[in-house]
Amino acid sequence: MSSLLSTEGLSVVLGAQWGDEGKGKLSDILCGEADVCARCQGGNNAGHTIVVGDVKYDFHILPSGLINPSCTALVGAGCVVHLPSFFDELEKLQSKGLDCGDRLFISDRAQLVFDVHQTIDGLKEVELGRGSIGTTKKGIGPAYSSKASRSGLRVHHLYHFEEFAAKFRVLVENKRKRYGHFEYDVEGELARYRALSERLRPHVVDSVAYMHQKMVEGKKILVEGANALMLDIDFGTYPYVTSSNTAVGGVCTGLGVPPTKIKKIIGVVKAYTTRVGGGPFPTEQLNDVGEYLQRVGFEFGVTTGRKRRCGWLDMVVVKYSTMINGYTSLNITKLDILDQLPTIKVATAYHVDGKPLPSFPADLSLLDKVDVQYIEVPGWQTDISRCRTWEELPENAKKYVELVEKESGVPVEWIGVGASRDAMIRKPVSQ
């Protein structure tokens, strides 16, 4: 088959639903061929696990390309980074035998997340009460708020420390004016960041120059999207979203690359639907089906450990996601979780007052009223976890994949059939 990654520009992996689709496994496979793996947005609120042999590696802010010893990793300018967590994650990877410190870089333009942002995250959720978003309380939203209000601090500010300290004190004081007094050791935090800045120095690069040099050299570059389209600050189920652009546009704004350089966009679609935290979920199953998917799919968040809400595959969401991201192919994950079901439902349309909606609505009050239209298809009731080729899949499993292709208009290139690293089928795709 052809190369896994584009040889003419960037390849991008994006979540097509509400996150937790299993992007990590595909990224892991693709990184085996990548020279560079980059994160373009988000922070350590993302999370996925990659299993190599008997070893589990958890990734939150660091690009999972670090698994490949010949791949360099970049945390881009569009990311927000909590430095203690950055180094804690790096140390955990290295303690498991992954020698990656000299292959990890961070943009000098990346925004910093401080403990004060995490404190504010918790205070905001309390303030919202029953209308809370259900954030990870990692400080991501408040850090992006600081960025948007132009009061945030970036990596390069660390290397003019007196100016950095003055701006940091103002940042904290302004938060106390807004939220009332809260306990926070400002001087202790500054001392910690003075030490962290020197530790970080070898990793800091001008990411715009770095990315463009790699493109000039013809390197294979993989961009790992964090979260997913339905959590995008503009196009997701606002306000139950993250605070960054998780759509393909975030690749350009988060890495400083032109859209013409993006050649391959793979959308990752779980074979059913899950989401964490609050917000609308039209195909959610608060019944035995939802419980089955949660239990068999082991649907607990890598970052928070929270139980995920579960429901049927929603092709309205996938089609909407496809319109925005322009996927060149799809990866269906966790198809094996459906193995035991005698019949499977797939949502294909939303109706309100008997009339179909043209797309996924922005108005959540309208979304509350939708009548979800399903088609029901027979299951395969066969263990597919040992299948490694398209031909080995049972006929009804193939039909399920083909239904996704028909409804989305996008070819399925990858099919996940189990937890192990090699439990992935590459399906021939005509480009």
Image (cartoon, rainbow, N blue to C red):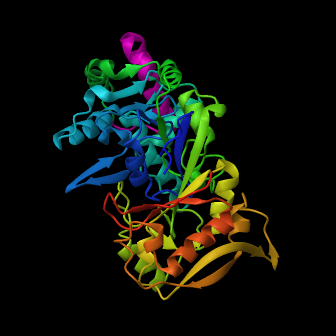
Identify which residue, 88 or 192, lies in the foreground.
Answer: 88
Q: Which residue is drawn at 63% across and 57% down?
A: 237
Figure check: 399 above or below 62? below
- Left or right of 312? Residue 347 is right
Name of the residue lying farthest toward the front: 1
- Tell me if residue 404 can be seen: yes
Identify which residue, 391 or 299, lies in the foreground.
Answer: 391
Q: Is residue 172 magenta?
A: yes
Figure check: 267 above or below 369? above
Q: Does the magenta stretch include residue 101?
A: no
Q: Which residue is drawn at 52% across and 32% down?
A: 78
Q: Residue at x 59, y 74 (%)?
A: 283
- Tell me if residue 240 can be seen: no
The count of marks equals: 0
Quarter holding residue 361: bottom right
Question: Where does the image place residue 27, in percent across and percent down from the top left?
Answer: 42, 48
- Magenta highlight range: 155-183
Question: Where does the image place residue 147, in percent across and percent down from the top left?
Answer: 54, 30
Question: Where does the image place residue 336, in percent across and percent down from the top left?
Answer: 41, 73
Name of the residue lying farthest toward the bottom: 342
Figure check: 187 above or below 89? above
> What secondary structure is the magenta-colored segment mainly?
helix
Figure check: 275 above or below 100? below
Question: Where does the image place residue 219, in percent across and percent down from the top left?
Answer: 46, 29
Q: Residue at x 68, y 73 (%)?
A: 348
